[in-house]
Amino acid sequence: MKNTNLSMLADFYEFTMAGGYLKSGLYKKKAYFDVFFRAVPDNGGFAIAAGLEQAVRYIEQLKFTDENISYLRSKNLFDEDFLTYLKNFRFTGDVYAVPEGTPVFANTPLMTVCAPAIEAQLIETYILLALNHQSLIATKANRIVRAAAGRAVLEFGSRRAQGADGAVMGARAAYIGGCAGTSCTLTDELYGVPASGTMAHSWVQMFDTEYEAFKTFCELYPNNAVLLADTYNTLKSGVPNAIRAFKEVLVPQGISDFAIRLDSGDISYISKKARKMLDEAGLHNCKIVASNSFDEYLIRDLIMQGAAVDVFGVGERLITAKSDPVFGGVYKLVALENEAGEIVPKIKVSENIAKIPVPHFKKLYRLFDNETGMAIADELCVYDEIIDESKPHILFDPNATWKTKTLTNFTAKELQVPVIKNGELIYNLPTLAQIRSYCETQVNLLWDEMKRFEYPHKYYVDLSQKLWDIKHELLKM
């Protein structure tokens, strides 16, 4: 949440390593860490980066209180020099990141931290938490919104989220991914995500009759009337009673913005029957909202079946990303700066090829076709490389190194932007509405073949020749 001291929200080994860096004299050594993920959730074609604002606010507010110091002292592991260092702690490093809402791909850095080793180590856990969680939910939300094919999607998952922060930040991320609003009031108050809601089944049950419940609600909230029509029998009583309440209370006032909500049963069948009943009653403007354990696949199927749904409310399968609930972002050391100021690449070697990161302090470029404006590929380069747009550029197919693609009419754009310099925020954090709009624009620059839910087209993510050579030389050592 906002203005919360989360200094102790860290894996304990961050403190043992940080204390060790101080005692061994390594604490001032400049280190370069990348945040990246190894696989897109749900085997999708791309992910959506989110959570940068919370990561930045955490770094800005990071401090260790007397209570924090007392707790660490009680562990009988840390000397007083380290505790004194923490008491005076301030982040002094640099942070580069892709803007929130950017479509991103496996093994490319969402964020790069360049800081004294002790500082870079201490922020690892929360940075990963913020980026992993919100990127996961934004990615899931974007899949669901695309499945809805232009129909509004509302995030309805607070009561099934993993804790208060999961509900609030999950709703924020869902909005970035394209959801039109949320049921979570606190997310609206804190971040401006439009919150809405009307009634539960208990409201209807409180009254002697379903009609009385609907009529009373329309009288109390004439400009926010969404009537839950499936408490008893949707088509025999719920829809007819809603029609009666609308025509007796709202239509005479000239109000035409109202809806019914369906929360159970065969949504495809019931929604089509309900639409026919509403139209026959002359209520052509009445919308149908549906909520019933939806995900992108069920929504896609409902639309294929001709379901008459205007708005989808999606709960637990969105707020928990139930089908693939771990984003899998990692925080890996990729370079160190030596005493001469040279940046020396570092690599972690593993028998599992997928766990070998790309070494070095890097630039991340996205290449766009000048004729179509569409994204063609991403390319990782060494930090001092510049892609020359005036010359033909060769890309290697990430899945077949013998297959290449030559670009001749393209634009190269750096994706990472400077966010923090020498510990100070230099990036103008956009509003949430701006992030959401940016996300929609950037997703539209990806080919439709990449947006398939099953077997999406594999996007080019290439290494420059210089970076490829550096990586393979390190692997030979």
Image (cartoon, grey):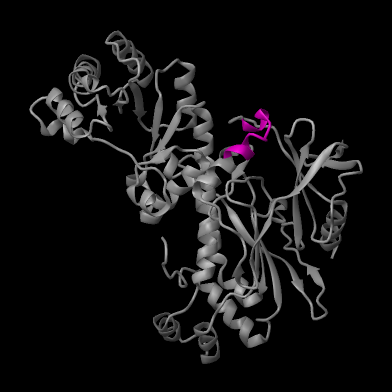
Magenta run includes residue 325: no
**Above or below — where is 17 with respect to 302?**
below
Residue appearing at x 47%, y 43% in the figure: 175
Residue numbers of the magenta segment: 440-451
| Nearer to us in this view, 317 or 50 | 50
Residue appearing at x 76%, y 56% in the figure: 363
* Extreme residue toward the right, this view: 391
- Give the quarter of the figure containing the N terminus: bottom left
User: Would you identify the image quadrant in which residue 26 lies?
Assistant: bottom right
**Above or below — where is 348 with respect to 342?**
above
- Give the quarter of the figure containing the C terminus: bottom right
| Nearer to us in this view, 253 or 308 | 253
Which x, y percent locates residue 202? 17, 35
Q: Is residue 300 left or right of residue 332?
A: left
Which x, y percent locates residue 312? 40, 30
User: Total marks drawn?
Assistant: 0
**Above or below — where is 13 with respect to 189?**
below
| Nearer to us in this view, 303 or 350 | 303
Residue appearing at x 76%, y 41% in the figure: 377
In this view of the protein, can residue 325 be seen by the observer?
no
In this view of the protein, can residue 229 be seen by the observer?
yes
Q: Main secondary structure of the magenta part?
A: helix
Q: Is residue 19 left or right of residue 235?
A: right
Q: Is residue 96 left or right of residue 11?
A: right
Magenta run includes residue 443: yes
* Extreme residue toward the bottom, this view: 80
| Nearer to us in this view, 293 or 65 | 65
* Extreme residue toward the top, this view: 280
Which x, y percent locates residue 410? 82, 39
Q: Is residue 473 left or right of residue 132?
A: right
